[in-house]
Amino acid sequence: MTPASPEQFKDAVRQAWDASASGWNQQTPAIRNWLAAPTATLLDEAQIGPGMRVLDIAAGAGDQTLDIARRVGEGGRVLATDISPAILQFASENARGAGLPQVQTQVCDAEDLLPGETGFDAAVCRLGLMLCPNPLGALRQMHRVLRPGGHAAVLVFSEPQRNPCIGILMTTACRHAGLAPRDPLTPGGLLSLGKPGLLQDYFSQAGFTDVATERMQAPFQLPSARDYLHFVRTSASPIVQILGHLNPEAREAAWADMEEQLEVFQLPEGWEGPNELLLAHGMRPLG
């Protein structure tokens, strides 16, 4: 059940991502294979280039953070933030391991970004904004920390019918957990920003100009549905969180049910789960 207040919700999200941090980091190769093309377009639309100061919000274990750091080069700076201290520690370690000292990290709530700090050339958020209970508030914070003329870009999941795998996972998890089906557009959910026009409207309300959105196909390709569920079980904390109070036998029954349903996406050459993302971007006005 969703906690009663935004603060309780965020505490639950923080704890869940702390618990899933190691698994998410270990799944970096699969995540990169899934999101490489959308991530490149995300950084293009944020107009990230050499020497820039860039904010990466909900950075996770920092896969895209390293891409940003390579774009800005030695003369730039990247600040990676996340609500989870545990997952952000992996981002810091990964940056050091990649020889990218221009990356810094800071634990931070996306809805209360870096009080008193401004002047970033660009801000990005890859698959994190939809998990904010107040995404408009988070976008207003992104707008505040940018310099005039700076660009923001985000990736989120599009509407439920275009992301059937997530729908199967959420519906099945709730049913086995004895919870009522969740409205996928409820704030803070994986598909909560998928309603057509909603994200673009939020960008405009937050004060951005030259706002645009585009759809991007991002199928998840693995050998089998079981491999996909292994990814989800080790790294996708929102689903794991729903099943957390069940006993081991009941949890296994839920996962087996999901696997059976997800096998509909098995092809002769492997498993391909449909996913569609929305990329939205805008600029803080010069005036």
Image (cartoon, helix red, strand yellow):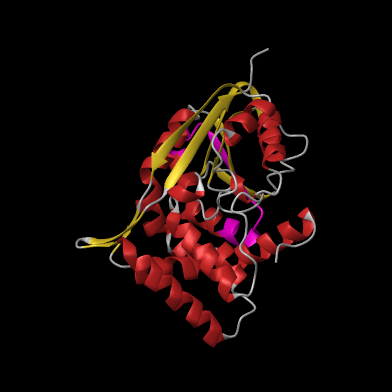
Which quadrant of the structure image shows residue 80? top right
- Marker count (numbered): 0
Side of 146 relative to 7 (left or right): left
Q: Give the range drawn in magenta.
A: 68-89
x, y (%) of residue 137? 72, 38
Considering depth in this image, is 257 or 63 the residue closer to the camera? 257
Residue at the (63%, 75%) spot, across then down: 178
- Asked if residue 98 is positioned above or below residue 74 in the image, the reply reads below
Q: Which residue lies furthest to the front in this view?
A: 180
Task: Give left or right: position of 42 versus 246.
Answer: left
Q: Which residue lies furthest to the left in this view?
A: 268
The reply, left or right, for residue 236 in relation to residue 145 is left
Residue 147's spot in the image, x, y percent? 65, 23
**Magenta-colored stretch includes residue 221:** no
- How far across and down, in percent of the image, does residue 105 sit? 61, 48
Quadrant for the C terminus, please: top right
214 lies above or below 135:
above
Q: Where is residue 140 in the image (x, y as percent from the top left)?
A: 70, 33
Rendered residue at 66%/60% (across/down): 13
Q: In which quarter of the image is the N terminus?
A: bottom right
Judging depth in this view, the residue of 67 and 206 nearest the camera is: 206
> Is 107 or 238 nearer to us in this picture?
238
Q: Can residue 141 be seen in this view?
A: yes
Residue 21 visible in the displayed image: no
Instruction: Determine the residue positioned at 56% across, 26% down.
Output: 282
Is 43 on the left or on the right of 265, as rendered? right
